[in-house]
Amino acid sequence: MVDAELGSSLKDVALHKEVDGIVGLCGGYANCGTCHIYVAEQDIARLPAPDEAEEMMLEGLFADRQAGSRLACQIIAGPELEGLAVTVAPAQM
Ligand code: FES
């Protein structure tokens, strides 16, 4: 369990907390895939759908894409996401 600062991306939170498997090579511009996470099935609907850039990156990932696949850099922590359950996807590199 990791506490997230409101307004931070989940990628930035993960890097700050030194979560294994999150790299964030592109700096959060949705073009490296090294922040790939799996959102738990029960929480998928709590997030807005991926935008076009995120969707394109998700299509090109090496790790299995699952229903809950998202880029942590594109998810901003807010009170509406309290308790969101995610796991880190296998490495992209
Ligand atoms: S940090 Fe590169 S896609 Fe998220």
Image: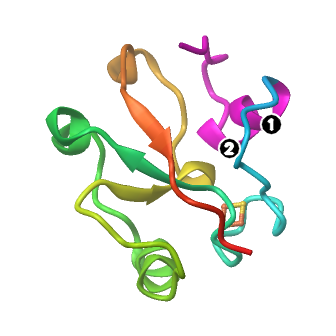
Disc 1 residue type (three-letter): Leu
Q: Which residue is mark 2?
A: 11
- Is residue 24 highlighted in magenta? no
Q: State which quadrant residue 36 falls in.
A: bottom right
Question: Does the beta carbon of the residue at mark 2 sit less than 8 Å from ligand 1?
Answer: yes
Residue sitting at 47 percent across and 23 percent down? 78
Left or right relative to 39: residue 1: right
Whether 83 is drawn above or below 91: the answer is above
How far is disc 1 from disc 2 in space, using C-alphas? 6 Å
Q: Secondary structure at mark 1?
A: helix
| Left or right: 37 as drawn, with respect to 31 | left
Task: Estimate the x, y position of residue 41 in percent, counting from the top left.
Answer: 18, 42
Residue with the mark numbered 1: 15
Which element carries disc 2, helix, strand or loop?
Answer: helix
Residues under numbered marks 1 and 2 in contact, where contact means CB atoms less than 8 Å apart: yes
Q: Is residue 53 above or below residue 6?
A: below
Dot 1, crowdedness within 10 Å: few (<14), some or many (≥20)? Answer: some
Residue that protrudes farthest toward the front in the picture: 90
Which x, y percent locates residue 25? 84, 65
Classify 10 Å Cα crowding around label 2: few (below 14), some (14-19), many (20 and above). many
Of residues 14 and 48, the one nearer the viewer is 14
Residue 24: x and y in percent read 78, 57
Type of residue at label 2?
Lys
In this view, 8 is above or below 74: above
Q: Quadrant of ligand 1?
A: bottom right
| Image: magenta residue range | 1-16
The residue depicted at 74 percent of the width and 75 percent of the height is 93
Q: What number of labels is visible?
A: 2
Residue at disc 1, CB closer than 8 Å to ligand 1: no
* Residue at horizontal 67 percent and vertical 31 percent from the top: 8
How far across and how far down the image is residue 10, in percent? 61, 37
In the rendered structure, the answer to whether residue 75 lies left or right of residue 26 reads left
